[in-house]
């Protein structure tokens, strides 16, 4: 089966209304772990509903004449102010502008998508309402939910995976089993093929528990973010550039076993490192709680010095590599040259603090098989 290339997690309005500012544990976990390789999605109707709900909640709290301590705390939470602030601005327009800015920033950072409202088929909607086809229910309730549902169905495509999160259990789930309503499943199945999939969850926690129970999804997400250099506040390439001298010095800078150095060389010394030229992340393993082990190999160009038997000096180097030669000795020739050094290694990495807690590397030997070196590591 081909690997799915498009993974989406669709958030219903009721999920965001529980956490307007996306600061709770569930959203914090998803943002920390790149939404578990999913692209976050909110239907336009749901976005407007959340915005309006925030406005109504703020207006209701501001209209409360009691101004109790509890009411003040709720206002501070809704407006997303710090509790120790002395400059509360209870301005609804300012609140909505700040909320939109915060929401849009988070969605932009995670390649989020606001789904446009589907073109209305009035006759089709009337028929759905009359027949009370889910998510319509008694009393013609369910117009907005139906628009949200239809826009979500439009995401389903070949090789796509769509996860729909809503706690509207009355309209999307069966009350007795907690499973998606048969009419909802049937309509989804009409759009699915053998390579696409749709999953249903009633909370952010359910989504995380299903996708990341063994931390494999978060490990893949971290791998992908590091490889594309899209992890916020940390770049493995930049970290290596900043620490490469101490890493090489600590783990044996003088060795003829490095790939790229002549096996006949004696007294090899690394004089200076020019620049990092390659980085490949082979594996990310979860260790404990917030800690991951990142396996990689990297190469750099550097300036070396070595001694060679006199008659071999011109045989083991390409002339373009040689920086200088000292042939004053009758037996040995000292050579300064440019070459590539390649290392295998790993770092232990705390994701939340973006901190490297351990590092270990070994030089890749030119006569060894790459897989054997990986096994040794």
Image (spheres, rainbow, N blue to C red):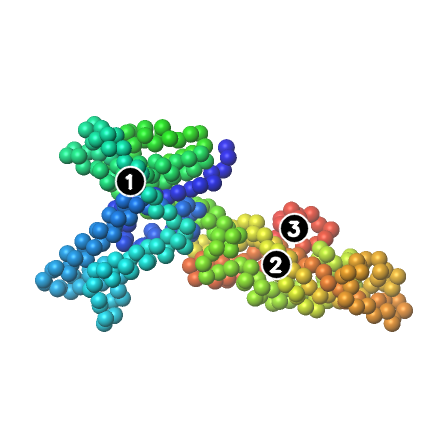
Is residue 104 placed above or below 275 in the rendered structure? above
Q: Residue at x 26, y 48 (%)?
A: 48
Front one among 336 and 321: 321
Tell me which residue sits at (48%, 47%) in the image.
220
278 lies left or right of 118: right
Q: Secondary structure at mark 2?
A: strand
Number of other residues with Cα within 10 Å of mark 2, as a class: few under 14, some 14 to 19, many 20 or more = many
Crowd class of label 1 (few under 14; some 14 to 19; many from 20; radius 10 Å):
many
Tag 3 or tag 2, which sits nearer the N-term?
2
Whether pointer 2 and pointer 3 mark residues with C-beta atoms closer than 8 Å, the reply is no
Which residue occupies the foreground of this view, 104 or 324?
Answer: 104
| Residue highlighted by disc 2 | 361
Q: Is residue 87 left or right of residue 307?
A: left
Question: Sequence order check: which comes first, mark 1 or mark 3?
Answer: 1
Mark 3 closeness class: few <14, some 14–19, many ≥20 residues within 10 Å: some
Q: Which mark is residue 148?
A: 1
Q: Which residue is mark 3?
A: 373
- Would you say residue 181 is visible in this rendering? no
At a point 57% along the width and 49% down the height, the residue shown is: 282
- Which disc number belongs to residue 44? none
State the image coordinates of residue 216 (x, y, percent, origin top left). 46, 46
Q: Earlier in the sequence, mark 2 or mark 1?
A: 1
């Amino acid at each position: 089966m081909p690997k799915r290339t498009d993974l989406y997690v669709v958030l219903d309005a009721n999920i965001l209304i529980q956490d307007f500012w996306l600061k709770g544990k569930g959203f914090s976990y998803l943002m920390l772990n790149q939404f578990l390789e999913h692209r976050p999605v909110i239907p336009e109707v749901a976005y407007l509903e959340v915005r309006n709900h925030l406005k109504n909640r703020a207006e209701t709290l501001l209209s409360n004449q009691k101004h109790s301590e509890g009411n003040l705390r709720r206002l501070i939470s809704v407006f997303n102010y710090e509790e120790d602030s002395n400059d509360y601005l209870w301005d609804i327009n300012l609140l909505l502008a700040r909320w939109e800015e915060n929401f849009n920033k988070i969605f932009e950072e995670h390649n989020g998508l606001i789904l446009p409202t589907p073109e209305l088929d009035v006759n089709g909607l009337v028929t759905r309402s009359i027949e009370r086809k889910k998510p319509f229910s008694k009393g013609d309730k369910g117009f907005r939910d139906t628009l949200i549902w239809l826009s979500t169905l439009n995401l389903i495509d070949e090789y796509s995976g769509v996860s729909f999160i809503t706690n509207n259990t009355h309209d999307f789930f069966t009350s007795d089993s907690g499973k998606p309503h048969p009419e909802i499943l049937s309509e989804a199945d009409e759009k699915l093929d053998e390579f696409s999939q749709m999953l249903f969850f009633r909370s952010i926690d359910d989504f995380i528990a299903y996708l990341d129970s063994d931390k494999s999804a978060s490990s893949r997400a971290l791998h992908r973010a590091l490889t594309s250099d899209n992890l916020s506040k940390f770049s493995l390439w930049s970290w290596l550039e900043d620490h490469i001298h101490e890493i090489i010095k600590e783990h044996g800078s003088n060795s003829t076993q490095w790939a790229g150095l002549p096996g006949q060389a004696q007294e090899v010394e690394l004089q200076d490192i020019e620049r990092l030229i390659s980085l490949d992340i082979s594996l990310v393993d979860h260790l404990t709680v917030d800690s991951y082990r990142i396996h990689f190999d990297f190469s750099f160009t550097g300036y070396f010095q070595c001694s060679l038997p006199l008659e071999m000096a011109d045989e083991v180097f390409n002339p373009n590599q040689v920086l200088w030669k000292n042939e004053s000795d009758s037996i040995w020739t000292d050579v300064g040259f440019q070459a590539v050094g390649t290392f295998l290694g790993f770092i232990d990495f705390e994701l939340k603090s973006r901190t490297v807690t351990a590092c270990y590397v070994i030089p890749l030997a030119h006569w060894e098989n790459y897989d054997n070196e990986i096994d040794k590591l």
